[in-house]
Image: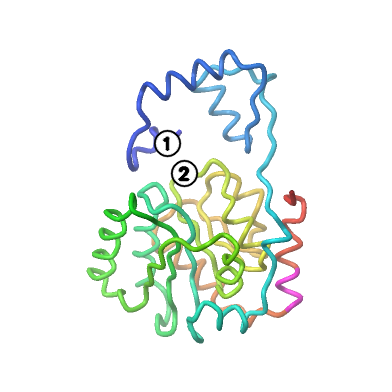
């Protein structure tokens, strides 16, 4: 699936052959989505009757809404409207497309993109993305935070006004579950399980692709919503109850 997209590093042939052999000889396979099941059948020759679809789950005890003012004080971004990205820093995640979406936003003043993720292996990609933000003249509106401890993530999700997942590929999309569990709406591309996770127009939007103007349009819709209250936050959180551990 990843190799077919042609973005980022290709999976080595040895790994693919090994996975193909394993898929053929194992007694049963658990897949997170129907889409992944179809790819196992198509690319690895797996038998459909040997594959069960079991979605990923989210720890609803850890990922809970935090009062927005408390969360904002904790993460230290003042009154800015916060657009959040969480994930590995690699080309497959489409962060470049998200950066290119920022100039399309209406009235960019007071809006900040916060990017969480990375590490030593991501340093080259982070530097490339920072250069792009300078070329787009949005460097003052973008913060690269690096890795954040898992237990602190509910503060960031709760402080955000929108979480954006502009990936070219996802096997499932756990970040969307974590964000929604904290009551924050999501904009995501039509990959992984996002269509079954996000309620279109209610808890966020699934866009057909990660074209920057498509992402910007849906981000603007979320940022223009009236300030979140306890009832809307609870509604978003309740939408992922079926994905509880």
Q: Secondary structure at mark 2?
A: loop
* Residue at the spot 43% in from the left edge and 71% down from the top edge: 113
| Residue 26 in the figure: left or right of residue 243 | left
**Rendering coords of residue 6 (x, y %):** 34, 38
Q: Secondary structure at mark 1?
A: helix
Residue receiving disc 1: 2
Q: Is residue 149 above or below residue 74?
A: above
Residue at horizontal 61%, vertical 17%?
Answer: 26
Q: Does residue 65 belong to the magenta stretch?
A: no
Q: Which residues are magenta?
A: 230-234
In primary-sequence order, the first of circles 2 and 1 is 1
Label placed on residue 169? 2
Q: Is residue 145 above or below residue 141?
A: above
Judge left or right: residue 28 versus residue 9: right
Q: Residue at x 57, y 75 (%)?
A: 159
**Tag count:** 2
Asked whether the beta carbons under mark 2 and mark 1 sit within 8 Å of each other, the answer is yes
Distance CA(mark 2)–CA(mark 1): 7 Å
Q: Is residue 169 left or right of residue 233?
A: left
Q: Quadrant of the N terminus?
A: top left
Image coordinates of residue 34 in percent, x first then y, are 63, 34
């Amino acid at each position: 699936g990843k190799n077919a997209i042609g973005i980022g590093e290709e999976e080595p042939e040895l790994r693919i052959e090994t996975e193909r052999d394993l898929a053929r000889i194992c007694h049963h396979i658990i897949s997170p989505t129907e889409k992944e099941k179809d790819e196992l059948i198509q690319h690895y020759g797996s038998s459909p009757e040997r594959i069960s679809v079991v979605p990923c789950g989210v720890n609803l005890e850890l990922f809970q809404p935090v009062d927005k003012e408390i969360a904002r004080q904790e993460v230290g971004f003042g009154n800015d409207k916060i657009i959040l990205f969480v994930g590995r820093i690699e080309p497959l995640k489409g962060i470049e497309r998200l950066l290119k979406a920022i100039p399309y936003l209406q009235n960019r003043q007071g809006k900040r993109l916060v990017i969480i993720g990375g590490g030593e292996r991501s340093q080259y990609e982070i530097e490339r993305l920072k250069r792009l933000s300078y070329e787009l003249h949005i460097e003052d509106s973008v913060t690269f935070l690096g890795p954040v401890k898992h237990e602190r993530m509910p503060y960031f999700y709760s402080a955000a006004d929108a979480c954006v997942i502009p990936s070219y590929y996802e096997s499932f999309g756990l970040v969307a579950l974590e964000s929604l569990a904290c009551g924050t709406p999501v904009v995501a591309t039509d990959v992984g399980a996002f269509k079954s996770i996000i309620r279109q127009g209610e808890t966020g939007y699934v866009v057909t692709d990660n074209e920057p103007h498509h992402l910007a349009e849906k981000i603007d819709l979320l940022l223009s919503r009236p300030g979140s209250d306890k009832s809307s936050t609870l509604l978003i959180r309740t939408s992922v109850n079926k994905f509880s551990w």
